[in-house]
């Protein structure tokens, strides 16, 4: 069974195919491609965009989404991930799950009889990275050699997925953050085997020649107890007008959202002309719909 638990589950060809399907869906195509199909959306953590964009994407393709909050399920009373997964496989055709621990999602996916999509874990956010790179592709057509810089928490889920996806597609990935935060070693090794990655604790050096500047919240879901430490650690890495001035002229600002204006980014930048945050958010719906189509080729009839 092919899943999308990690960007590592996809080759370059798979991603190109997903982008081609996205183009078709954005032009109004593939309308009934998920007809009579059900998508389970299993969420252990809050979500505004990913939940709604998956639901809307599934409806757009003629299918039915079923939202499940684990707090209201037997999983909250100790039912195992394996049993929950087996049960959802009986009732639905495809599952997107947002889980606290990536290892739990791996267990869940192993037990599933239908394709499983990672809707965010502590380690990765693959659907986000694919939507973001699709957004860059809409602006720049050819992704080859484009420098994308990630500023701030360079060990977070979004950074990990962008690191793998961008280098797989021939882009250059620059990580800009404090020495105390180390990128995921295994992912860094993999990314360096397929492309160019730089790491810097200097905004000026790290952002040089960047066409796209990306940041994420300083305190991710589940990190509430270390919020004070993280904010202090990252305080020098706000994306403000000065930081943007280190990037290429005409560079774009990106954020997966939710944003914390005044922390990782200033209002001036996120609401300014260079910001493409709404395009990124809109594309989540189309790219996730394309992922459903792509993975549904293996769904039982
Ligand atoms: N970007 C993103 O995943 O947002 P949500 O947490 O609102 O789904
Ligand atoms: N790194 C963030 C991403 C939110 C979409 C988090 O995990 O909370």
Image (tube, grey):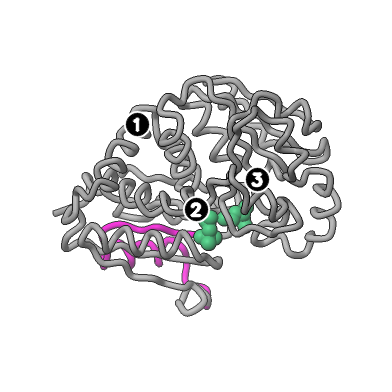
Q: Residue furthest left?
A: 301
Q: In the image, ligand 2 is in what quadrant?
A: bottom right
Instruction: Please report the residue visible at 52 percent of the width from the left and 73 percent of the height from the top.
Output: 78
Q: Position of residue 70 (x, y in %)?
A: 48, 72
Residue 180, magenta (yes or no): no
Cα separation, mark 2 vs mark 3, equals 14 Å
**Height in image: 274 above or below 46?**
above
Q: Is residue 286 above or below residue 176?
A: below
Front-lying residue, 34 or 262: 262
> Which residue is under mark 1?
16
SS at circle 3 = strand
User: In percent of the image, x 58 and y 38: which residue is there?
Assistant: 252
Depth check, front residue: 153 or 141: 141
Q: What numbered label is drawn on residue 278? A: 2
- Which residues are the magenta region? 77-98
Please tell me whether mark 2 or mark 1 is closer to you in this view.
2
- On screen, residue 260 versus residue 211, left or right, reads right
- Please give the label number shown on residue 52: none
Q: Is mark 2 within 8 Å of ligand 1?
A: no
Q: Secondary structure at mark 2?
A: helix
Residue tagged 3? 215
């Amino acid at each position: 069974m092919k899943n999308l638990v990690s960007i590592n589950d996809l080759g370059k060809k798979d991603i190109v195919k997903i982008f081609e399907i996205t183009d078709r869906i954005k032009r109004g195509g593939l309308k009934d491609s998920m007809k009579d199909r059900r998508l389970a959306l299993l969420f252990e953590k809050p979500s505004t965009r990913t939940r709604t964009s998956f639901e809307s994407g599934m409806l757009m393709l003629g299918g039915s989404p079923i939202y499940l909050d684990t707090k209201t399920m037997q999983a909250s009373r100790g039912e195992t991930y394996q049993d929950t997964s087996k049960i959802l496989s009986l009732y639905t055709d495809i599952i997107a799950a947002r889980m606290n621990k990536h290892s739990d999602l791996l267990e869940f996916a192993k037990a599933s009889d239908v394709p499983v999509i990672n809707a965010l874990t502590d380690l990765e956010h693959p659907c986000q990275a694919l939507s973001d790179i699709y957004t860059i592709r809409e602006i720049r057509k050819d992704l080859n050699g484009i420098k994308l810089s990630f500023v701030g928490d360079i060990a977070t889920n979004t950074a990990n997925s962008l690191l793998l996806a961008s280098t797989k597609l021939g882009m250059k990935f620059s990580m800009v953050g404090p020495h105390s935060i180390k990128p995921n070693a295994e992912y860094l090794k993999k990314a360096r085997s397929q492309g160019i990655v730089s790491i810097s604790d200097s905004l000026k050096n790290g952002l040089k020649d960047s066409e796209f500047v990306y940041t994420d919240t300083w305190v991710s879901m589940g990190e509430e107890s270390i919020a004070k430490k993280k904010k202090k650690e990252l305080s020098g890495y706000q994306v403000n007008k000065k930081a943007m001035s280190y990037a290429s002229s005409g560079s774009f600002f990106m954020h997966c959202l939710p944003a914390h204006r005044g922390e990782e980014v200033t209002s001036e930048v996120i609401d300014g002309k260079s910001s493409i945050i709404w395009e990124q958010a809109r594309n989540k719906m189309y790219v996730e719909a394309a992922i459903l189509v792509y993975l549904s080729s293996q769904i039982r009839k």
